[in-house]
Amino acid sequence: MGRRVYTEFPAYIRIPLYGFVGIALLLLVLPLAVALPISFNADPWFTYPFRAVSLRWFEQLFSSPLWIGAMINSLVIAISTTVVATTLGTLAAIGLVNPRFPFRTAVMALAISPMIVPVVVLGLGLFIFFSPLGLNYSYAGVVIAHTILASPFVVITVTAALTRFDFNLMRAAAGLGAGRATAFRTVMLPIIAPGVAAGAVFAFASSFDEVVMVLFIAGPQQRTLPKQMFTGLREQLDPTILAAAAVMIILTSCLMAVAYNANKNR
Amino acid sequence: MTLPYGDVGLAMTQQDALTGNIASSTAGVVVRSSIRSDNNRRATRAALPAAPLLIFLLLFLVIPIGSVVHTAISDGEIAKALPLTTQALQAWDGDELPATAIFMKLGQELEAAGHVGSVRPLARRLGYELTGGASAILNAQRALSEDFDRADPKAWKAHLIKADGAWGQGGVWSIIKQHDSRYSAFYLRWATGFPVKIEADGSLSRESSYDFRSIYLRTILISLVVTGLTIVIGYPVAYVIANSSGRTAAVLLFFILLPFWTSLLVRTMSWIVFLQTNGVLNNALAGTGLTSEPLPLLYTRMATIIAMIQIQLPFTVLPMISVMRAIPANHVKAARSLGAGPLLAHATIFLPQAVPGIAAGGLLTFVLCLGFYLTPALVGGPSDQMVSFFIARFTNEDLNWGLASALSVILIFGAGIVALPLARHVARHSSDRI
């Protein structure tokens, strides 16, 4: 991307403009930047300055069976969701980039629609649909619900990766005698892997963060980290919640950074 | 993969044109139909990899939303428990009490309903539409286990009216009469704010219900304010990012993407820590001596709107950037060289070309705002709750799925109208979204 300059705004416009943008961006990250370090405050207060710094809230987080259980649940559900959503989404993207795909635009809109449909409506729908099937209050039910929400991320990132993919390579592989599955595994998949990885990371993060579906579908057995945080936020704000939030952010942003770099280096 | 089949098809058409009537010959038909079936086969093969996701979406997205619509118009509790009573009441004119035979029928059907466990749903359903409706059913049910002359219809009537006075008035009977079908617009009328509840004497209930119209209005209003403000804040941000390059653009983009990547719940939580009574902002204000006592910042409309803006800003800014980057820089330069001032050139040349991005970002933000649940629920007060909050509440706490579904139907219908142009945009630009 070369440098584009649309207008050389004179200084009397440029300086207020940059100032405004600077403040806007600062406000965007300020609450997070202010809230998260409080998890290191030794005192159970949500204020600055600290009298002492400590890791006691993290200790509490990792020694409470309730929080550990929630973290394990979140990991199990997020990993299952990632596997299912990445598989379904990658395959669907391969179909959707084919110009022969019937009703391509409409199907693409359907595949992306979970991003736009209000989550409570989806939650209610699944709750009603699941109740005769006995899927409410089950891991399978939560994973299905999260897969619905996560699959658009995979479809979008893999579609983007595939638009840069040279389909002549697949023909070359076929010409050399590879079957469709072999060509996919040995030629296409390695090339689009960064896109698939990015999709998988988004899928993981979306499931790991998700709380509304959990409120509708999950029972006490499937209490996840966000659910535990949500309950805490509604009842009594406690610095352990901040520690949990810090853990969540560190985990997801590390994954995001990996996926971002994998895509950028291509 | 374009193997020569397309060319064969083309050659056939040309040949048809040359020889005139070859298409009517058997050979032509066979070739044509085999080409068509080959095309069908190719379309099927193209669609095949997408089949698992499509089946998944059909099962767990389309059908569940269909069942929300179905639940919104299903209203079968009364018709199911009292089919004969409902049928017999069709001939009733509503001026005086129904015939004694109908009382007996009602009593018998209530007894039968007690055996199959449909009394509670019946009582709850009647309670939605009639003040004291639930207890009318439960009291009658209880009284039927007592001793009375079961052979005499008059005894049934006297016994039921003694059990609950509602049976001696017209209201409850007129409701039962209406329920000859398993479907009705009752929940949709309720969810659109029409008065649906009556008193035992048939007059409109004075009991106050949820004012759903003002809840929709509030939902739309908050969404509009948030959308407007994200556009006003997002436009200069997008402009500066689109206008910068290399490292600067990456750093600025990072500031946009960091909150975008961060959990919605965590971002909402950080606003709670920031704004609460003993929170960071209040302490800072008190520390500088600007305020003597903490301001009520959390659980307000303002907190809701600010938090929603922060959450939505990336969604508004990203489509704007991608559209702005495609605007040729020469246009504005040309305008400037023809003598337009910097602001005039921007407003007349650049801004109009950025409108598709503004529209896409704004629409996306507006649609997503309509469905907001978490943020208003955590940082808003009781009067800041939007439709989604009530859907969740009626589903999980009140167990009134019919009303929750009706509210959902209206919400997705409204959001769908707004989202239609958006879907077209997303389909066109789906590859450059993230």
Image (cartoon, grey):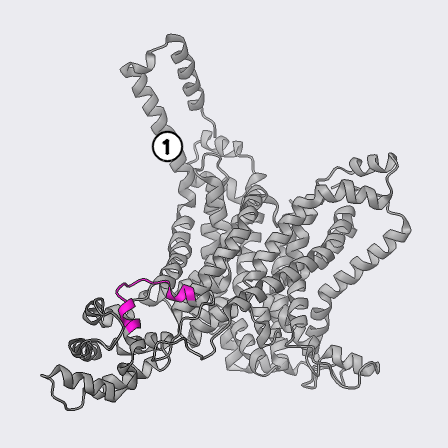
Q: Residue at x 30, y 20 (%)?
A: B30
Regarding residue B217, the answer to whether it shows in the image is yes
Q: Amino acid at mark 1?
A: Asn
Q: Is residue A26 left or right of residue B426?
A: right
Left or right, residue A172 beside residue B164: right
Q: Could you tell me if residue A138 is visible in this image?
A: no
Give x and y (percent) for residue A177: 43, 32
Tell me the quarter of the picture where residue A137 sits. bottom left
Q: Outermost residue, bottom direction?
A: B147
Judge whether B288 appears above or below B367 on screen.
below
Residue that label 1 marks: B40
Q: In the rendering, at what x and y percent does residue A144 appear? A: 42, 61
On screen, residue B168 versus residue A107, left or right, reads left
Q: Which residues are magenta?
A: B174-189
Out of A114 and A156, give the one closest to the viewer.
A114
The residue most toward the top is: B19
Task: State the image quarter where residue B123 is shown.
Answer: bottom left
**Is residue B139 highlighted in magenta?**
no
| Chain name for mark 1 | B
